[in-house]
Image (cartoon, grey):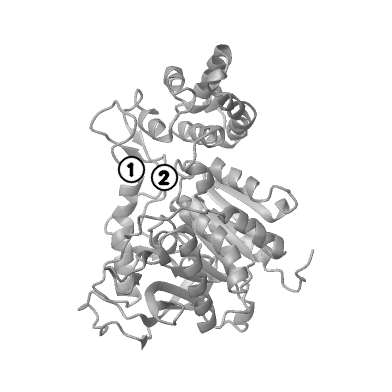
Amino acid sequence: MKKIVQFTFCLVTAFAFGQSRELPVDTVITTQHNATINGASFSYTAQTGTQPVWDENAKPIASLHYTYYTRNNIKDRAARPLLISFNGGPGSGSVWMHLAYTGPKVLKIDDEGYPVQPYGVNDNPHSVLDIADIVYVNPVNTGYSRTIPASGKEVDRDKFFGINADIKYLAEWLNTFVTRNNRWRSPKYIIGESYGGTRVMGLSLALQNQQWMYLNGVIMVSPADYKVIRNSGPVAEAINLPYYTAAAWHHKALPPALQSRDLLEILPESEAYTIDKLIPALAKGGFLEASEKEAVADKMAYYSGLNKKDILDHNLSVPTSFFWKNLLKDKSGHTVGRLDSRYLGIDKQLSGTKPDYNSELTSWLHSFTPAINYYLQEELNFKTDVKYNMFGPVHPWNNDDDNTRDNLRQAMAQNPYLNVLVQSGYYDGATTYFNAKYTMWQVDPSGRMKDRFSFKGYRSGHMMYLRREDLKTANDDIRDFINRTIATGKSAKY
């Protein structure tokens, strides 16, 4: 039986359920539920609502929608970890990890992650709610979160829509949330997917140095590191090769010598070639000897499944978009997905340099959009006519002064408790697993904190948790990470 409680503060408009396109600035709906997770049956509370973003004059300038899950009948809430969850984009709502990864409910999808009708949700027996309370946060203009007012010249976009603005206001918002919910003593973890990886790297230091909130862990899921992704050059161009190897292996497009072996046997070989040979070759640019260029193109064709001539025509620097379009051109004629290259698409014509559309994203939106709208309104009783923004209007996004990688390093140096877990799918072509490894390697150039980093890879894509087998494994990896890093009774010292 569900118990519903509503608390409302500083209304923008009357919260007439189902009759308004505006939400209260500050409100919460509480419901009660039961779950069986990781073999344990228990009840839990779900709170979903809005909480203000304040300006320097204590005036609300935005209201963020969130959903907060707490396990009931916990004797010592202070000792229980709190997991704070963000997705990415920038401009993406928190729906993805909320309804498919760590939360108590998951989409109705098949074992590989493809949509199933009728749309809806099932229980998630692998959620980490058994060992941690979880809050899913929608940044401004995502989900039901909005600026105040929702649009117009009065909106100061510089306060929200950029790497550093995003980090600053979210850190302040989290201070309010933690205070309201009496979680200051709890071990705290932040998890971010895709652009959320950039976000949580920056938040680790902002929370620590601006809010005096120290973390035990940062979890980056398929992280987007824009120090690499938005730049050209030998490293950025070369480190796509191991992903090409993985995606081609999945589609049985590699030479027999590689295809006959397991994926995890051949990836270290492709990684080593990338670091030891391909990056130095690309660094020589047009001064690379013709014979060496031929040899490199041969190896790249071997490890990617692409045509050697196409590789040479690109001067050894093959864009990911070309790979998605052309890997299967002469085999089945399909394109492969950007965020998850297991997914196939059909273009208007076979020739070209990039796919017509993202086949994986269209598949995901099939199931996620109806599920989140149904779930929030019907199971969590948060009824509104406001549109849930799967992707919201946040652009242009200010990418200047991105120091998030070093922010994480500095936070770790100052806080001996702080550990990092990186999770990636091998078939992710947008934020590739080898890019994630490279980011991890670059955070701490001294290497003195490398024992506090861990990497986990999965045989799926950007949202690796959509694959049933990886849903369990990836949650278990988070569970193990949290249990290992709670640091109960250990002094924070080197």
In the image, 232 versus 359, the foreground residue is 232
Q: In the structure shown, which secondary structural element does the residue marked by tag 1 occupy?
A: loop
Residue 73, x across and y down, in percent: 55, 83
Q: In which image quadrant can residue 202 be found?
A: bottom right
Is residue 329 something one can see in this rendering? yes
In the current view of this chain or complex, which residue is farthest to the left? 19
Q: In which image quadrant can residue 13 be found?
A: bottom left
* Mark 2 nearby-residue class (10 Å; few <14, some 14–19, many ≥20): many
Residue at (62, 34) in percent of width and height: 268
Residue 250, x across and y down, in percent: 46, 35
User: Pointer 1: what residue?
Assistant: 358
Disc nearer the start of the sequence (1/2): 2
Q: Is residue 276 left or right of residue 326?
A: right
Q: Is residue 389 left or right of residue 485?
A: left
In the current view of this chain or complex, which residue is farthest to the top? 291
Amino acid under disc 1 = Asn
* Mark 1 nearby-residue class (10 Å; few <14, some 14–19, many ≥20): many
Q: Which numbered disc covers residue 425?
A: none
Quadrant (top left, top right, bottom left, bottom right) of the C terminus: bottom right
User: Pointer 2: what residue?
Assistant: 339
Q: Are marks 1 and 2 in contact (CB under 8 Å)?
A: yes
